[in-house]
Amino acid sequence: MTSKNRSFSISQLAEEFGITTRAIRFYEEKGLLQPKRNGQTRIYSAADRVKLILILRGKRLGLSLEESKDIIEMYHPDQDNSQQLQTLIDKIREKREHLKTQLEDLRTMMRELDEAEARCTDALTAMKSVTIS
C-alpha cells in the first residue's frame, strides 16, 4: 500500500498527534475532515492526516478553525497555490501584529503592577514604623 493509499483509524491519528478522538470528531463536524465509513468505523485517508497536521499547525499559529478551513480549502494540487500561500502570509502577519499589541499591553500591566506593589510595600513599611515608634 503506497503512502497515498494508506488509511488510519481515529485512534491511530489521536495517538500520533496527542489529541483526543473527540477533537478529531469535532474537526469532522466542522467539515475539516471527511473520513470514509465502514459501518460505524471511520477510515481516514492520507489526505485527512495531512489536513489534521495543518489544522493543528494553524491552531499553534493562533488561527481559528474557520481560518484554517478556508486556507486548507484553497489548496488544489494541480494548480498554482500562490493565493493560498499569500492568504496564510497575511494571516501570519495579522496574528503577529495582534501579539505585538498584546505584548505591549502585558509590559504596561507589569509596570503598573510593579508600581502598585511598591506603593503598597512602602505604605506597609510606613505603618510598621509608626506602630513601633
Image: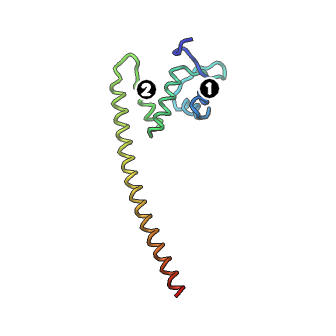
Residue 52 placement (x, y as % from top left): 52, 28
Count the marks: how many? 2
Q: Residue furthest right?
A: 40
Residue 57 placement (x, y as % from top left): 47, 33
Name the residue nearer the viewer: 110 or 70. 110
Residues packed near mark 2 inside 10 Å, few (<14), some (14 to 19) or many (20 plus): few
* Residue pointed to by mark 2: 73
Q: Residue furthest top?
A: 1
Task: Identify which residue is drawn at 41% across, 64% down.
Answer: 112
Residues packed near mark 1 inside 10 Å, few (<14), some (14 to 19) or many (20 plus): few
Name the residue nearer the viewer: 125 or 77. 125
Q: In the picture, residue 70 is in which quadrant? A: top left
Up-down: is 8 above or below 91? Answer: above
Amino acid beneath label 1 = Gln
Residue 88 placement (x, y as % from top left): 37, 32
Would you say 94 lies left or right of 9 here? left
- Element class at badge 2: helix
Up-down: is 98 above or below 23? Answer: below
Upstream in sequence: badge 2 or badge 1: 1
Q: Are marks 2 and 1 in contact (CB under 8 Å)?
A: no
Task: Identify which residue is drawn at 49% across, 32% down.
Answer: 55
* Residue pointed to by mark 1: 12
Name the residue nearer the viewer: 97 or 125. 125
Q: Quadrant of the N terminus?
A: top right
Q: Nearer the viewer, mark 2 or mark 1?
A: 1
- Element class at badge 1: helix
Q: In the picture, residue 95 is in which quadrant? A: top left
Task: Identify which residue is drawn at 39% across, 56% down.
Answer: 107
Amino acid beneath label 2 = Glu
Q: Residue furthest bottom?
A: 133
Residue 76 placement (x, y as % from top left): 40, 20
Give the spatial CA distance, label 2 vs label 1.
24 Å
